[in-house]
Image (cartoon, rainbow, N blue to C red):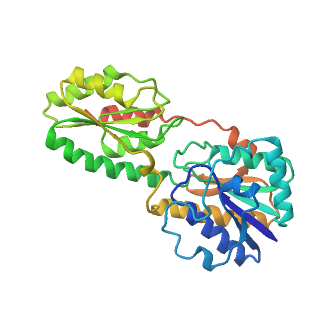
């Protein structure tokens, strides 16, 4: 049996660990494993090479993806999906493992409708796939934000200023939410809750009244309020200097945490097990600490449940 593996969409720490697991578990199961470069874009161009045990050596701890990744407008068309199936058939690939987020999985779903056996691994820092408790890369991204909060707090205290830390999260505020709780932020602005700048200012003023030297505000990029506007209003109301730190792509890189390495490794191994047992078209994830597999369409249809209790906890802990 021949299987292919690709990484698609935004890169996430742990993708290399997933590739490594797919290759080594696949070869151990007697399969030929082919790496597809640059995601669906590379698939359309036939950028496919056979991988060996040594080709995934020394990558477990590395961020990014050795297979490279890209977004493909060509693949998003009906013609693109059909051509992808033809290319897979040309190389004799019996099953395809896709490591990526929501868009990548939806592409995989379209391939499955044409008869391609597809396994999906949740590789995205956003943690926006509802069928799995966590996605590959999320834990590392949050820990990157926590490290930034610690460093920013030191200098914010020295200068007695407010600091807004802008994090990724266009549609899902989990990075901001979890980092806000773990990092002791005074306030968190996220897409799921309408922003209340007056509430943020009240928290800062209340803290200053208790002698607090600094305030950290986490702003998800999709909160609906730009960090520049937020900083201007906070400075005017509180009378305290307010700076902005935009973490941007720093959140995508770095050494993956233990949690991300485990999730990636176990998910990759599960994909091979399913293929070996003749099971087709599954999205793999973790539920209550256990690796599980779901039908792709059903997995993508699940709606995220926002954790209101965790959000409200920020308000209590920051008093």
Give the x, y percent position of residue 272. Answer: 72, 66
State the residue at coordinates (59%, 53%): 123
Q: Position of 60 compared to 197: left or right? A: right
Give the x, y percent position of residue 38. Answer: 65, 57
Quadrant location of the C terminus in the rendered image: top left
The quarter of the displayed image where residue 22 is located: bottom right
State the residue at coordinates (20%, 31%): 241
The quarter of the displayed image where residue 301 is located: top right
Name, please, the residue furthest toward the front: 45
Q: How many marks?
A: 0
Give the x, y percent position of residue 44. Answer: 76, 54
In the rendered image, is residue 48 in sight? yes
Q: Nearer the viewer, residue 226 or 183?
A: 226
Q: Position of 129 compared to 221: left or right? A: right
Q: Is residue 231 above or below residue 98?
A: above
Q: Position of 150 compared to 83: left or right? A: left
Quadrant location of the N terminus in the rendered image: bottom right
State the residue at coordinates (62%, 76%): 55
In the rendered image, is residue 120 in sight? no
Give the x, y percent position of residue 4. Answer: 74, 64
């Amino acid at each position: 049996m021949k299987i292919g593996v690709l990484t698609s969409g935004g890169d996430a720490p742990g993708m290399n660990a997933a590739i490594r697991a797919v290759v080594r578990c696949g070869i151990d199961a007697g399969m030929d494993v082919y790496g597809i470069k640059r995601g669906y874009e590379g698939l359309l161009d036939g950028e496919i090479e056979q991988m060996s045990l040594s080709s995934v050596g020394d990558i477990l701890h590395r961020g990014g993806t050795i297979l490279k990744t890209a977004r493909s407008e060509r693949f998003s068309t009906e013609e693109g999906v059909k051509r992808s199936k033809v290319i897979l058939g040309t190389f004799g690939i019996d099953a395809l493992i896709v490591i990526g987020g929501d868009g990548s999985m939806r592409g995989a779903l379209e391939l499955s409708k044409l008869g391609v056996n597809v396994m999906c691994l949740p590789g995205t820092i956003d943690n926006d796939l509802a069928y799995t408790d966590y996605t590959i890369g999320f834990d590392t991204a949050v820990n990157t934000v926590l490290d930034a909060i610690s460093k920013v707090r030191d200098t914010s205290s020295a200068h007695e200023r407010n600091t807004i830390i802008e994090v990724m999260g266009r549609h899902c505020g989990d990075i901001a939410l979890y980092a806000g709780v773990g990092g002791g932020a005074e306030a968190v602005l996220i897409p799921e809750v309408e922003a209340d700048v007056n509430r943020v200012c009240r928290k800062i003023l209340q803290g200053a009244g208790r002698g607090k030297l600094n305030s950290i505000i986490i702003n998800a990029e999709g909160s609906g309020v730009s960090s520049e506007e937020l900083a201007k209003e906070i400075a005017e109301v509180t009378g305290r200097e307010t700076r902005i730190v935009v973490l941007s792509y720093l959140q995508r890189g770095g050494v993956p945490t233990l949690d991300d390495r485990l999730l990636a490794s176990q998910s990759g191994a599960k994909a091979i097990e399913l293929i070996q047992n003749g099971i087709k078209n599954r999205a793999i994830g973790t539920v209550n600490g256990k690796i599980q597999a779901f039908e792709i369409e059903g997995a993508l249809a699940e709606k995220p449940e926002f954790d209101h209790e965790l959000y409200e906890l920020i308000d209590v802990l920051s008093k």
